[in-house]
Image (cartoon, rainbow, N blue to C red):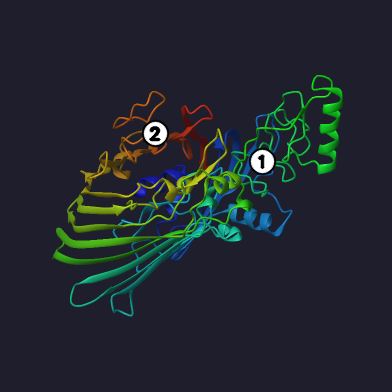
Amino acid sequence: MNRLLGGLLVLASASLAAAEEPGLKPSYSASMGSVTVGDQQLYRLSLRPDIPIGKWGVALDVELFIDNQGGISDRGWEFGTATKATDTFLRKLYYVRYGKPQDNTFVKVGALDQVTLGYGLIMDGYRNTLQYPGIKKTGLQFHRRDIGGMGLGVEGVINNFQDFQESSALLGARVSAKATGKLELGLTYVVDLDQYGGLVDGDGDGYPDAVDAFPGDKSRALDNDGDGVSDDLDSDDNNNGAIDADPNSGLPGAIVADLTKLNTDYGDVVFPVDRLVSRKRPFNKEQVGGDFFSILGFDAAYPLVESSQLKLKLYGQVALLLDNNDGLTLAEADSQGVQPGNRKAKGFGLGAPGLLLSMGPFKGQLEFRHFQKDFDSNYFDNLYELDRARLDVASGKAQSKDARLNRDQTLSGLFGKAGTNLGGMVDASADYQYLTGGDDPKQQIHANASLSQHLLESIPRLRQAQAYYQKNNIGVYLDENGKKDGFLDPTPDTFYGYLLGLEVNSGVALCWDTRFLYRRTALGVLERQKVMTIETVFTF
């Protein structure tokens, strides 16, 4: 998605917007309101100083969370270890920047709202702010264009410095140059060192929070029967009234033998023991070797028309999947808590010929695409931080994104994108992909719209209004009745939301930031998740 998605995380704070204009004085804002953190709704107080210094800009976000019992949470204020102290410091930093995105030199550390490398076949609209403010990531985005006046350029992205602690960061880089005449060449490489790094593990015990019965306690994790007693202390993990005496009970062999003997001597009714206990084996990061995945791409472009009113560029791009051989047997997958079916992803994608058009307020893109085997476009998109790896809530099994790619298909079709500023009033854009060649057409749609600042100034009290919608892999999901999803039916690949800001008094605004995602419950039912922030923002 375009800059709309980056803007929605600013929470309508006028002070944060001010940092994009050099020469402005420091400004400050404070906010208070309800926010979604994981599955909880907490009250959040935040102070946001924004300090522009020439080409530099610093925006902080100092916050305090209060639970529904009135207690103050230690979220973002933990100093017990060097890692926690570093995370605490980084949570206070919204971003530090040098320059602006349109400048030849631009560097930003902190929240990344919109990152595209090249023409978007590999990385398009990536952001690390999807779960903000519940989860804050501190990343890096930079570019340097026209180095030495020779048409050379370099740009890059790091999703989250904290991820380096577990060797699971997402890294991207691109170099570009002008070859002969007007011909432009580019080379892009993006790698996720471990896709399982996207699974949040708050207490660092290896079990992601979604399958950890005690997500705030590193000494405890699993509770197979949900009775509130961790499995390592529970003598009856499946709550059937019999003492566990199976090989996975954790008891020494001699004790298991004695328990079994007592059961034999006195009978099952008198002293029942359970020698075949059914337990879940959820995913544990410490039991797997990670899941490396990368894509290498090359592109070339030639401007056909260059004028103040019309720009037309012909381009082509190709990308190749580079995956590790992470195939697992059924037994290995079960023991590691990984869903079966992992294997080495292979294939390439071609986007050529393509045309980029800019004509006044209208921008357009049209591209022929051809994908072989497992390749999929926009792999690193704005939902990637959630899609890197998913957990099945019922089984606790994990599945990385590359394991969900289309398998051994040849697809061809068109991708188109159009955007416009309607009379300086509304910014809107949409893109659509339609490829055929498999059992079903491969479709995706993204759309967004926002009122311009010019129009907002003419509407009393309204300070921000934006909405967006995204759906990938249309028509490939089955509901509980075995019916495939329709064009706009919700699926785990659906994401939409809105941002609305209303001025209630001078320097005081009420802001709604609401995002909707979908996931499967333990019963296999699709459940809508709402990530909501309602805040009163004071600017002074």
Please determine whether, in this image, residue 531 is positioned above or below residue 437. above
Please determine whether, in this image, residue 406 is positioned above or below residue 489. below
Q: Categorize mark 1 by other alpha carbons within 10 Å: few (<14), some (14-19), many (20+).
A: many
Q: Amino acid at mark 2?
A: Thr
**Quadrant in which residue 433 is drawn:** top left
Q: Nearer the viewer, residue 168 or 236?
A: 236
Residue 293 seen in the current view: yes
Determine the CA span between mark 2 and mark 1.
27 Å
Tell me the residue at 34%/39% (across/down): 471
Earlier in the chain: of badge 2 and badge 1, it is 1
Query: Which element carries disc 2, helix, strand or loop?
Result: loop
- Whether residue 417 sits left or right of residue 527 in the image: it is left
Query: Which element carries disc 1, helix, strand or loop?
Result: loop
Tell me the residue at 72%/24% (across/down): 240
Q: Nearer the viewer, residue 348 or 122?
A: 348
- Whether residue 389 sits left or right of residue 423 in the image: it is right
Q: Nearer the viewer, residue 303 or 29?
A: 303
Q: Amino acid at mark 1?
A: Pro
Question: Which residue is most to the front?
Answer: 265
Residue 37 location (% of width, % of height): 57, 38
Residue 343 location (% of width, % of height): 45, 52
- Whether residue 92 sits left or right of residue 50 in the image: it is right
Which label was assigned to residue 491?
2
Residue 294 location (% of width, % of height): 42, 60
Q: Categorize mark 2 by other alpha carbons within 10 Å: few (<14), some (14-19), many (20+).
A: many
Please determine whether, in this image, residue 444 is positioned above or below residue 377. above
Which label was assigned to residue 215?
1
